[in-house]
Amino acid sequence: MNSIASLHATLHLAGVYRRPGVLHNREGRLPEKERLFFDILQFEQETGMRKIGFVGLGIMGQPMCLNLVKAGFDVTVFNRTAARLDRVVAAGARAAGSPAEVAQQSEITITMVSDTPDVDAVILGEQGVVEGAQSGSVVVDMSTISPSVTQEIGDRLKQGGVDMLDAPVSGGDTGAINGTLAIMVGGEKSIFQRCLPVFQAMGKSVTYVGGRGMGQTTKLCNQILVSVTNMAVCEAMLFAQKSGLDPGIMVEATQGGAAGSWQLSNLGPKMVAADFAPGFMVDLQQKDLRLVIEAGRQMNLPMPALRLVHQMYAGCQAHGEGREGTQALFKSFQRLAGEGA
C-alpha cells in the first residue's frame, strides 16, 4: 500500500470527517499534523496531483524534500551532486537522471538551487525541466533569483502549457528541517491554491503575494530586512562587549522587547559562542543583496543601509568567510574595532 493509500485508511479508521470548514475526528478538532494530512488527501482527490518532482538538494532543498516525502507525496528527485540523493532516496523518494526526467514523472516540479544562472540551466538548459514537463503541469521555483528572469522563464514555460509559480522561502536550514519556513508565492492565484497543500508540507507561513515575480520581489524585501537587522545586531553585540556587558545577557534582556528580532534571538547567541557554521551562507546572502542592488538601481533607489551591509559582508568574503553563516558578519565589525577577528 503506498503512503497516500495508507493515509486514507488511517484517517478512515480514526473516524475522521469534516464539518463545514473544520476537520474533526470522534474526539473533536484534529491537531495540525492530521489536518495537513487530510488537506493532502483532499488535494489529491480534487487535482489528481500527488507526483512531486524536486531538483536541488542543498542545505535547504534536502530537508524541504524530506518533508514532502514524510507528508506522503510521491517524490522524484535530482541533484547534481549524487551523494546528496542518498538520504531522500532512503526516505522513500526516487532518483532521476536529469531535471527533464524529474519533470516527466511529476505533476508539480520544484526547483531549489543557488542562483539565477542555475535556475535557468535546470529549467531551460539541456535536459532541463522544460524538456520533460507535460502540458498542464506546474513548475515551482523556490530559489531566490532575479524577478525579471523569473518572468522570462515563466513565459517560456507557458509556451508549452506549463504554469509557473515563484515561491522563495525564509527561515534558514532550521525552518527547512522543521517545516516552518515562511513561503512567499507569486503567480496565478488559482495555481497557487491548487499547490497550497504542497507548500503547507514545507512551511508554516504561506502567503500569496501577487502575480509572477512578486514572490521574488517579496523575498528581496525580506533580504533587506534581515541583512540590515543583522548589521544592527552585530553593532549592538560589539557595543555590549566593549562596554563590559555580557553580550549573552544583553540578548536575553532585549529580545523580548521592541528590539527583538529573529536575527537577535537566533544569530546573537551564535555570535556569542563564536559559532559560525552556516544555516545560510555569506556567499548566498551576498548573491541576494546583489539582486536587490541591481533592482534598486533600475528604480533609482539610493539604499544606503543595504549598500553598507553589502560592503561589510564583502569584508567577510575577503577573509575567506564566504561559506560561513551570515552571523560571521560580526567578525567584520570586530576587525573594524581592532578586535583581530
Image (tube, grey):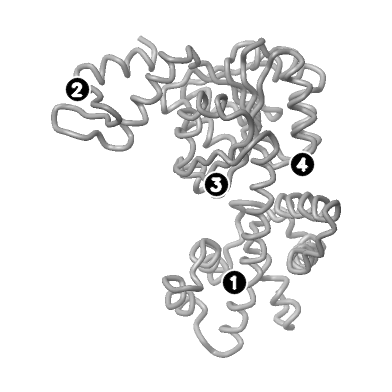
The foreground one among 222 and 2 is: 222
Of tags 4 and 2, the one toward the viewer is 4
Query: Mark 3 to mark 1: distance in Å?
Result: 20 Å
> Residue 105's x, y, as percent?
60, 11
Seen from the viewer's position, the closer of residues 269 and 212 is: 212
**Mark found first going from the N terminus, 2 or 3:** 2
In this figure, which residue is indicated by the disc labeled 4? 146
Q: Are marks 4 and 3 in contact (CB under 8 Å)?
A: no
Tag 3 secondary structure:
helix
Name the residue furthest left: 27
Residue 311's x, y, as percent? Answer: 80, 66
Q: In the rendered structure, find residue 173 and report the number of the disc placed on it.
A: 3
Mark 4 lies on a secondary structure that is loop
Tag 3 and tag 1, C-beta contact below 8 Å: no
Which one is earlier in the sequence, the residue at label 3 or at label 1? 3
Which callout, 2 or 3, points to the residue nearer the camera? 2
Whichever of callouts 4 and 3 sits on the residue coming sooner in the sequence is 4
Q: Nearer the viewer, mark 4 or mark 3?
A: 4
**Front residue of this view, candidates 123 and 318:** 123
Q: Callout 4: few (<14), some (14-19), or many (20+) C-alpha neighbours within 10 Å?
A: many
Quadrant of res 22 = top left
Give the number of the disc on residue 233: 1
Image quadrant where one finds the N terminus: top left
Q: Are marks 2 and 3 in contact (CB under 8 Å)?
A: no
Mark 4 near mark 2, Cβ–Cβ under 8 Å? no
Amino acid carrying mark 1 in the image: Val
Q: Earlier in the sequence, mark 4 or mark 1?
A: 4
Q: Which residue is mark 2?
A: 14
Q: Quadrant where the C terminus lies?
A: bottom right
